[in-house]
Amino acid sequence: MRLAEISRNPKTWVWLAILLALVLLAAHQWHYYDALGRDAVDDAYISWRYAQNVVQGHGLVFNPGERVEGYTNFLWTIASVPILALGAGDAMGQIGMALGALCALITLLLVYAFIRQTDERPIVAGIAALLLAVDGSFALWSVSGMETAFFGLWLLAGATAYLWENRRAGRPGVLSGVFLALAAMTRPEGLLVFGLTVVHQVLVRLADLRRERSWLAAAVNWADMARILGFLALFAPYFLWRYRYYGQLLPNTFYAKVTLENTEAQNSRGWRHLETFVNVHRGWLVLLAPLAAFLRRRVSLWTTYAALVLVVYGAYIVYVGGDWSVGRFFAPILPLIYLLAAAGLVRLAELALALLRRVTADRRAVWVVGAIGVLLLTAGLFALYDASSVHGEDELFVQRFQAATATRARVAFGQWLKTHASADTYIAVDAAGQVPYFSNLRTLDMFGINDKHTAHMKVPGMGQGTPGHEKFDFPYIMAQQPDLVIVYGPLLDSSTEYTLTDYAWTDDPALRAFLNVYRRNDWSLAP
């Protein structure tokens, strides 16, 4: 095939765009890998602490003998068990970052499979992949070591399977049910997306009664029941096990972070979080799809499904009060956001070309307009990168939270404790990941993610503070009498029971300045 013939093949441009997106995303991920200090964020190590205890024979717990569900990513946590069992504990951060990066790269390829199940032009997949590649939140949280990209991959796989199942009448929905069950076992929001998928399918059946004999036949379709059975086959045994094991319907993290009473402050904070996300992600782009659909008088199955998921998922994020990050909660649904945006851009371009052809038959004018379109897209990609990455995650998360310094300090101190502290040392921390993981010591999580008492305490004005950092019972912490308290900031400077120590755990003054280590006065470090 000649080069000219290849260039005229639409799929060629699609795959070139996807290939470029893969390269851009890999470079973007490497930037954040370096910016994070070449190690996973602290929260990722909470899950690996649970996996660590599984390998050591203590069960899926944070502290041996305490059954507290301080994680919300069962499948991601369990997947790390064989890695730790093989002796890769010290490299778990880098391995987790690499696996998350791989999931994000696969997601870009899955975007093309998604579009193939629709009536959209293939180039929509290429544009959506490029938008994802330059998005700061998508890149950062794919290399955070957390389950974000893993969860997003299962969500998109479930959505793709759902569209594939609807392309032919009577095709059973088992595949989408299985994928969404895996998503729900990775994060609780997967259960929400599965429920929305079932609702959307019922609404589609009811809207197309020409193929059904009755309303009942429309609402209860055996092909759709297969989706529910496929989901329950995986999710139900898992849910029954976790309820029996931990004794709570919801993870302990939910109780630590969310209130169901007097949610006004919580909701207000959620709206502010949504506003921040929209501002730094050029969120108005998603409106291009419904706008273009209105102009063409066409609404498709996939756009209504994506819109339903995004609206309800967004409302859920607002209700729970958002997150301390910029876009971690939104990252798993970014593929749907940018698929809608890309579809809107392509549809508007089609309308512009159609209008141009009415005005002139000169093909050169079409090529000029096409070139302008490419330049505009390129400028838009740079603008999105600048807003979501440079002035988004880089500025508002990496720099604000001193991510690289925090990682190096906590890892170094945790490793130092492992060598210099006795095995029965009891520590209290404000960040429950890296220090407990590397020290392997019994730990009190002062913000309650892994502590039932703190998680279930009532806090007046819940929702006014930082998400996940509002519940803090100082008398309770003091009553537990931890040997060491490791925090960021001068928590116990005025205490008569604890003394600020100056252990030689690092030669780096920046790391020493980041962590304050308080020792109980009647306790001494004894290896």
Image (cartoon, rainbow, N blue to C red):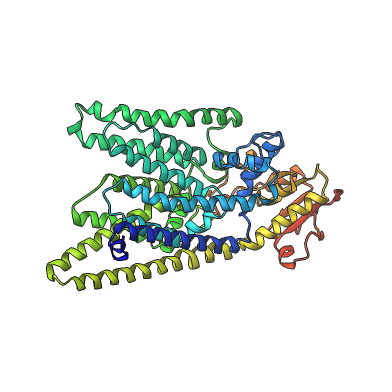
From the viewer's side, name the closer residue of 56 and 255. Answer: 56
415 to the left or right of 322: right
Q: Residue at x 57, y 63 (%)?
A: 398
- Residue 304 in the image: state x and y as whole percent: 29, 46
422 to the left or right of 258: right
Q: Residue at x 28, y 59 (%)?
A: 346
- Residue 26 in the image: state x and y as whole percent: 51, 60
The answer, for residue 276, to whether it is visible in the render is no
- Residue 241 in the image: state x and y as whole percent: 56, 28
Q: How many tags in the picture?
A: 0
Which quadrant holds residue 494? bottom right
The answer, for residue 238, to whether it is visible in the render is yes
- Residue 235 in the image: state x and y as whole percent: 48, 32
256 to the left or right of 130: right
Quadrant location of the N terminus in the rendered image: bottom left
Q: Residue at x 51, y 63 (%)?
A: 27
